[in-house]
Image (tube, grey):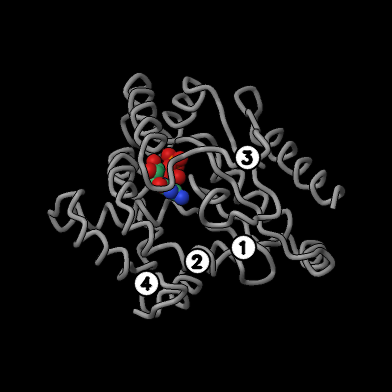
Amino acid sequence: MRPSCGILVPGGWRATVLWAISPVVAQSFGGGLDHHRRSVHMARMIIAIDGPAASGKGTLGKRLAHHYGYRHLDTGVIYRAVAKALLDRGFDLTDEARAVAIAMELDPENFGHPELKSQRIGDAASVVSAIPRVREALVNFQRQFAADPPGAVLDGRDIGTVICPNADVKIFVVADPQVRAHRRTLEALARGEAADEAMVLADILKRDERDKNRAAAPLKAAEDAHILDNSNLDVEASVSAAIAIVEAVRAAR
Ligand code: CDP
């Protein structure tokens, strides 16, 4: 553990995480020389994507990172990993001391664990993520990820407001709750999990309420965020709309 900017950082975490994230990074650089050239000739950017549960931030983040040859961090997976570790060890989700200790010792090799995607862990993550000291323990890693070359796309709840308030482009993704519940149900079914759309909807609404109303880094659009409503957009149209936002911001510089 080493102090940095007054905030505790898990020891050795950064290097390990970057290594563990390398498949994602590799994916982000996929697309060959064109993408490489594009990133070389473009100024380094930080793109912040925030939004409520199941709004499509992750897919959008991944696709934008691929498009620009940047790295991508799904920050939700970090909170999900803390929640899963607490549950696996039989600890209470509101046990602050243990949650902070776990946040500082996270093993990024577990970030790809399929259970992290589950509704149960998403719900648990929303409880754990409301603990301010847990959030503090994770701030510097996210900021460092954002600052490292060649540029980065981070998605979450507080990227544009707290983690990267100076991000070059901020996009706040929204979609009707019913649409989000439908998409999330299809995802769960595709993974072979049982999913009832009405229950998924209830979970999404409950989680949004908790995320919006917590004191620490609540879910909200930054004042300078561009709102992208993808209720009636498929993935391709949503990615095109996001690229159009980024390009408009760059052109206006
Ligand atoms: O994929 P989905 O939108 O359902 O959730 P997620 O992005 O994986 O985030 C899971 C939970 O972690 C959220 O409900 C938030 O409570 C929390 N989270 C957060 O507080 N801050 C972030 N930057 C990302 C996630």
Amino acid under disc 4: Leu
Query: For this rendering, which residue is in front, 111 or 226?
Result: 226
Q: Is the residue at mark 2 in contact range of ligand 1, meaning its CB lies under 8 Å from it? A: no
Sequence-wise first label, 1 or 4 = 4
Question: From mark 1 to mark 3, how far is it between C-alphas?
Answer: 25 Å
In percent of width and height, residue 244 lies at 79, 40
Mark 1: which amino acid? Arg
Q: Disc 1 designates what residue?
A: 71
Q: Which residue is drawn at the image coordinates 40% and 63% (left, top)?
A: 138
Quadrant of the rendered image holding ligand 1:
top left
Task: Give the mark nearest the N terminus, 4 or 2.
Answer: 4
Q: Disc 3 designates what residue?
A: 223
x, y percent for residue 11: 36, 79
* 4 and 2 marks in contact (CB < 8 Å): no
> Where residue 12 appears, x then y in whole percent?
40, 80
Q: Which residue is mark 4?
A: 8
